[in-house]
Image: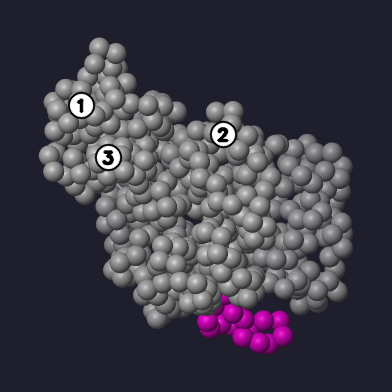
């Protein structure tokens, strides 16, 4: 496959679209898309007017007259009426089953503007539930509420005395449970917090109902399995992704059962998205030892996902210095967050990844979480040098200046989510102060070292629409245009940089840059048609872009209005 691609690229670079060469070596196009404004992301020919597809591949791209020379009597010609075409967008960090769960019934609390609204929404669900039935939901954000205080269970318990309730904070790293859920899990004032977790307690030593990071497992063990099969959740998420212009996703934590669900959907031809799956670190050694790396057309499993720390919003991110708004823990010691996974285990997985040939991707948000992750990677690589390992740090949200160049030095990819910046900028100074915040969401500083950033959304933490990420990347503003000029505007990405981060560089982060991420002969025919030019429209309009057509492997899998 790669030899064929190189042959085509060589012909392209040397002779443009040399019609005779293309006609001699190319299958007859099944479809030619014409009258388009195409951004190819191919440096050799960044703009084009038409492209030809045979099977699941692009076989020609160039000017309208050049490509139409390939037309055969059986070729279908699609006039795109001057609309803009982009390579299919790739979300490099997301959680599709969770997205599907909210679409299929979990209470979505993202619109709640106060805790009272949360309580009312839960109360409404309780009225429809059987006694003892679990009420599950999430996506609440106390930073959007008056007073911005973390909630306690009292009001929640009052409206749900006979139903256990578990509702996750928007970051997924903290949850609020009611008294019924705590009784079922045996959580009381004497319950010790597990390593890497915290049971928040009030001044009297009673649990408030808030469980942070690994403490959530105390409740997770009690919760029933979803009433929906994993395949149903994934199909619902796929529907939403295709309509948003995503042709590929990196599922950032799957278990063996999730892989089986993906495999079944792929075998049945129902998996349209291209999925790059990261196996949970707790399964990685055994899973890859048994199955090895699996590379497929719609499903690739060649990565492991670990966690160094929690999230900044719920104060679980692991910091080098204490939190500005929580300088001391309950025992009077400096509070620096949580290391949810021991660095020794991270090192063990990193070494095994290098030995078995799978990629290691580690969630790290705080500056110490990032440093510990880079240290573990460096130690593993020193023992087993591997030139093209492409290890990743997922989020890389807060970096000490000394650690920014280490990504390039170690060959580590920062996998980042632009909308995290514009969601979190409201409270970052409160958590860490303005000086440390200079290393937060430091896209431009990282890019200047020569690394590639792979962008995603972390949905359903953020919305699954990648154009919101593109807007955030180029403006560092919210949808109301605040703050003027952008939050730390020196860290903005250019339009081309952010577009690459959702296409070619996201593909690179999955070892797939030879197949996707740009529109070139020999690559997969994964592309989207949008209603305006993302490269030239006013910056604010990039957030409003609508997808008119999503094509994967030459098949139109979504048509918009």
Residue at image mark 2: 266
In this picture, which residue range is highlighted in magenta? 316-338
The label on residue 24 is 1
Q: Dot 3 surroundings within 10 Å: few (below 14), some, or many (20 or more)?
A: many
The picture quadrant where one finds residue 416 is bottom left
**Corner quadrant of residue 57:** top left
Give the residue at x 27% y 37%: 521
129 horizontally vs 516: left or right: right
- The answer to the question of whether label 3 and label 1 lie on touching residues, with beta carbons closer than 8 A, is no
At a point 24% along the width and 29% down the height, the residue shown is 25
Instruction: Classify residue 116 as left or right of residue 62.
Output: right
Q: Secondary structure at mark 1?
A: helix
Q: Quadrant of residue 168?
A: bottom right
Indicate the secondary structure of the residue bearing disc 2: helix
State the predominant SS element of the stretch in magenta.
loop
Residue 536 included in the magenta stretch of the image = no
Residue occupied by mark 3: 520
Sequence-first tag of 2 and 3: 2
């Amino acid at each position: 496959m790669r030899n064929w691609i190189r042959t085509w690229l060589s012909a392209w670079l040397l002779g443009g679209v040399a019609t005779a060469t293309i006609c001699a070596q190319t299958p007859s196009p099944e479809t030619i898309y014409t009258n388009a404004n195409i951004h190819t992301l191919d440096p050799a020919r960044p703009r084009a007017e038409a492209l030809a597809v045979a099977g699941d591949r692009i076989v020609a791209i160039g000017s309208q007259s050049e490509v139409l020379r390939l037309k055969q009597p059986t070729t279908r010609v699609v006039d795109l009426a001057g609309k803009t075409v982009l390579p299919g967008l790739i979300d490099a960090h997301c959680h599709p089953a969770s997205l599907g769960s909210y679409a299929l019934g979990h209470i979505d609390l993202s619109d709640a503007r106060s805790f009272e609204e949360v309580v009312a929404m839960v109360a409404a669900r309780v009225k429809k539930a059987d006694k003892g039935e679990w009420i599950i939901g999430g996506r609440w954000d106390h930073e959007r509420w008056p007073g911005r205080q973390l909630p306690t269970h009292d009001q929640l318990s009052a409206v749900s005395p006979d139903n256990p309730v578990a509702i996750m904070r928007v970051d997924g790293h903290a949850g609020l449970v009611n008294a019924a859920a705590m009784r079922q899990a045996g959580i009381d004032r004497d319950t010790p917090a597990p390593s890497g977790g915290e049971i928040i307690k009030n001044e009297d030593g009673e649990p408030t109902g808030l469980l942070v990071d690994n403490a959530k497992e105390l409740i997770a063990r009690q919760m029933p399995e979803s009433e929906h099969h994993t395949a149903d959740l994934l199909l619902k998420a796929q529907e939403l992704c295709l309509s948003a212009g995503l042709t590929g996703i990196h599922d950032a934590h799957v278990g063996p059962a999730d892989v089986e669900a993906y495999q079944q959907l792929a075998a049945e031809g129902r998996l349209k998205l291209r999925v790059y799956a990261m196996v949970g670190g707790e399964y990685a050694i055994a899973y890859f030892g048994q199955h090895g790396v699996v590379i497929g057309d719609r499903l690739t499993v060649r990565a492991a996902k670990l966690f160094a720390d929690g999230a900044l919003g719920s104060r679980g991110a692991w910091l080098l210095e204490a939190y500005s708004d929580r300088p001391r823990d309950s025992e009077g010691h400096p509070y620096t967050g949580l290391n949810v996974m021991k660095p020794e285990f991270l090192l063990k997985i990193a070494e095994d990844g290098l030995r078995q040939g799978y990629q290691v991707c580690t969630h790290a948000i705080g500056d110490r979480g990032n440093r510990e992750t880079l240290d573990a990677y460096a130690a593993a690589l020193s023992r087993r040098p591997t030139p093209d390992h492409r290890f990743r740090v997922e989020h890389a949200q807060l970096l000490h200046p000394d650690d920014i160049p280490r990504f390039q030095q170690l060959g580590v990819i920062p996998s980042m989510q632009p909308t995290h910046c514009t969601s979190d900028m409201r409270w970052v100074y409160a958590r860490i102060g303005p000086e440390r915040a200079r290393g937060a969401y430091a896209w431009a500083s990282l890019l200047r070292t020569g690394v590639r950033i792979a962008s995603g959304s972390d949905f359903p933490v953020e919305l699954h629409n990648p154009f919101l990420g593109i807007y955030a990347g180029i403006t560092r503003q919210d949808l109301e245009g605040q703050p003027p000029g952008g939050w730390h505007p020196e860290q903005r990405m250019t339009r081309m940089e952010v577009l690459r981060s959702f296409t070619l560089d996201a593909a690179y982060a999955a070892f797939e840059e030879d197949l996707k991420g740009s529109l070139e002969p020999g690559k997969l025919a994964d592309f989207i048609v949008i209603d305006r030019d993302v490269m030239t429209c006013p910056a604010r309009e990039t957030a409003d872009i609508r997808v008119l057509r999503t094509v994967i492997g030459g098949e139109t899998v979504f048509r918009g209005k």
